[in-house]
Amino acid sequence: MAVDERGYDVLIVGGGPAGMAAASTAAASGLRAALIDERPTLGGQVYKQPGPGMRVTDAREMGAQYRAGRALIEEAEASGADLLLRTTVVDLAPADEGWTAMVQTDGGPVAPVRAARVIVATGANDRPVVFPGWTLPGVITAGGLQTLAKTQSVIPGERIVFAGSGPVALAFPAQLAGYGANIVAALEAGPAPSPGDLIRIARAAPGNVGLLRDAAAYQAALLRHRIPLKYGRIVVRAEGDGRVERVVHARVDADWRVIPGTETTVEADVLCVGYGFTPSTELLRLVGCSFDSREDLGGPVIRTDDWRRTDVAGVYAVGDGAGVEGSAVAVDEGRIAALAVAQDAGRMSAADAAASAAPLLTRVGRRRALTDATHRMYRVGDGIFELATPETVVCRCESVTAGAIAEAIAEAPEVSAVKGATRAGMGPCQGRMCGRHIAAMIAAARDVPIAEIPPATPRMPLRPTAIGAIADAEVTDPGLFEAKEGAPVEPARTDLVAEEIVRSARGPVTETDVLVIGGGIAGAAVAYYLAKEGVEVELLERAELNREASGTNAGSFHFQLAIHQLSGRGAEADRARLLSDARSSVEAYGLWTRLGAELDADLGLHQTGGWMVAETPEQLALLHEKHVLEEEAGIETEVLTGAALRDRAPYFSDRVLGATYCGLEGHANPLVTALLYARRAAEHGARVRTHSEVLAIDVDDASAAHRFTVHTTRGTIRARRVVNCAGGWAGEQAAMVGLRFPIRREGLHVNVTESRSPLLPSMVQHIGRRLTLKQSTHGSFIIGGGWPTGSTGYPRRYPTQWRSAAGNLRVALDVVPALEDVRVVRTWSGVIAFTDDLSPIVGESALVPGYYACVATTGFTFSPIYARQVAESILDRPGTVSPFPERFSLDRGNAALV
């Protein structure tokens, strides 16, 4: 069925047991409902239907599970709910009256579906278990093998080892044997049922007789097929030359840790892994729902009330996607959520909803009593995360090993930091396979429960989506970077309270000569340049180093004068300022070319050159103007049009009338540069303190030794001098000493694609529209240019927006049409600082002597050169640096006080 943009009372995402039950119940309750599923048929994984060309002649031969699924499918099909199959939700965002889902059907253009409320029934995925050999051909998940058996009647291999845990370890080998599979070993990591377990199960039997009868039938089938179920054993590794030939398993203790000396080898050509399932939570995380952690229910478990309402208004969560509890619970939860929606929408009274839900709630309670009774047997032990060796690949998309991840964790034990340092989780699956394992490694390193390790920030699109399907010509370009009325404003923080300032006074009091605030590239560079000259310096960062603007930009070198440097009045109107900026570009370029050698490390520096394109005669005239200024300042650029441009850059569209080229431009790795500065600073004696946020600064004009008393969340620091390197947050820091910085920050949207063969040798920018485009050394395209993000509270301040992706990618296609079918795999948000007069804030304050700042508006390119100059001014060496221009002044926002 085609997408209907009129809007629905409720949108159900997921066509498995929970989603089908929700759709039919919602429609029966008088709600206009739509169900979306990416498969061609209803049923989900549990009730997966036979594939094309397969015909069921006798439903009785297919078993009770098939018949139950078929009945639910027929109920949903007859319900009157719109069924949108072969349709994928790639984004979900709040709208004026409910929610807007961006969906793609059969690979076509992405379109909106609007609904007042959303029921998320996205199901679960097979739990990935990382062990040596898990990437060998012949290793397959239980869900994958089940799909082959149910939809194609195919059983691969001649000798199959099943290794798993929980109900699936009993049911699945029995089902496979029924399909004709040769199961040579069935391994259950959990313990065999004890008398106490059996007593607890018997007490939970009322209401669960059917499930217990099924379990007994599976046990009988294993005995009939002579398949011994070996308890307390886990797969240790898969071996073979190019594919699985042997499976090694071993005994485990109560926490699933391998007991040395208990290994056994089995000859096999297929290893089926079924250690349970993990909820598919991407959509719920994207909209900001809260989770708890229960590994026996798959890990992340959504917080809901009894009616399946989440803590995000208008969003309900049901089925295994909210916590893996099986299809029986999923069906009842789907119906309960639909009744809740009907009640919340005013289509059903509270009394009628309660009456309809009462038997469902009772049945769910009984199912959960059985789950609790089997907890000892089916509890997932921490040892499941400890099977990998340092050489084992954890992230399959990017081929990142456990050893590389462990090294990154030692540097910064956070998921986002590890992702940035290693690329683990950056591939097409976006961490669905490796994310939980990485979180477990971090938890082990920090000696905390895995529940305390938040996952990487979810971003749209939820599935890789072609640029051409996202791009939208109807989205207008935001234009120049100017403060606009109605622009998103970052909400005030509520996580810090005044009492913390009082408590911090009781913490340790330390002293330093220079305190640098801000652990991005500017702060780390200032600390380095001071420390290497023997200055006592401390670097302070409120979170982890390099996690704000410095670590979330694209790493490009912008030496050409760009759109964000223009006032809108033309290049001549900005002549003096632009000439000064251009000359700074020459100095910045010189520093970057030597920086790798100075820091004794690979910065990922690539001097690829860069284009600045124009699509209109007016833009082309502007290119000529800026070319004159750049040449005068010493930046060598050339203007190309017509055939000369086509010969040099055949990938540009006919819309591109001309372009300037600068051979100096390129990029470095923003994920390592600041960290290397900080590491070298520490080697020279600097103290680096993370997770220390500045709460207040007292200034004592009478003290020459320590004028500044800085109160932080981890104690008090007395300093002779302070350097504000807080980037977009520099204004808040300056206000603590009575200065007003004319600065604001904006969230910037960035798109990242899958890897492709080389196409763009040089970076591309646009003189009149917001676009930066380059192809990384990994082959992916990074597409940005300053399109806006949304704004929410700390710390999730700048969520990406579909509108910005659609507009940004349209500009990219207008310039380089060959990107049409390249898939976007993720988006992220960066932060950029802007000053009212487009000038940086660098130097020492005359109003507050000893207070310095190093805040560049093109931070990654210019921070190193400005940092070195600030350090030289602190060192007070005559002749080492010219005085900073007046337009850089820290005091220009306090002009009335001077």
Image (spheres, rainbow, N blue to C red):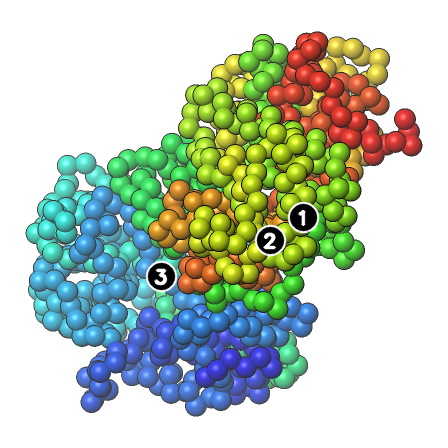
Would you identify the image quadrant in which residue 52 lies?
bottom left
Amino acid on which the number 1 mark rests in the picture: Leu
Tell me which numbered mark, 3 or 1, is placed earlier along the sequence.
Answer: 3
Mark 1 nearby-residue class (10 Å; few <14, some 14–19, many ≥20): some
Tell me which numbered mark, 1 or 2, is placed earlier along the sequence.
Answer: 2
Residue 363 visible in the picture: no
Residue 471 visible in the picture: yes
Q: Position of residue 291 (x, y in %)?
A: 51, 55
Rendered view: 767 above or below 70: above
User: In the picture, which quadrant includes the N terminus?
Assistant: bottom left
Rendered view: 607 above or below 643: above
Amino acid on which the number 3 mark rests in the picture: Asn
Label 1 – label 2 distance at C-alpha: 9 Å
- Are the residues tagged 3 and 1 within 8 Å (C-beta)? no
Label 3 – label 1 distance at C-alpha: 53 Å
Name the secondary structure under disc 1. Answer: helix
Q: Which residue in the structure is indicated by mark 2? A: 614
Image disc number at residue 622: 1
Mark 2 nearby-residue class (10 Å; few <14, some 14–19, many ≥20): many
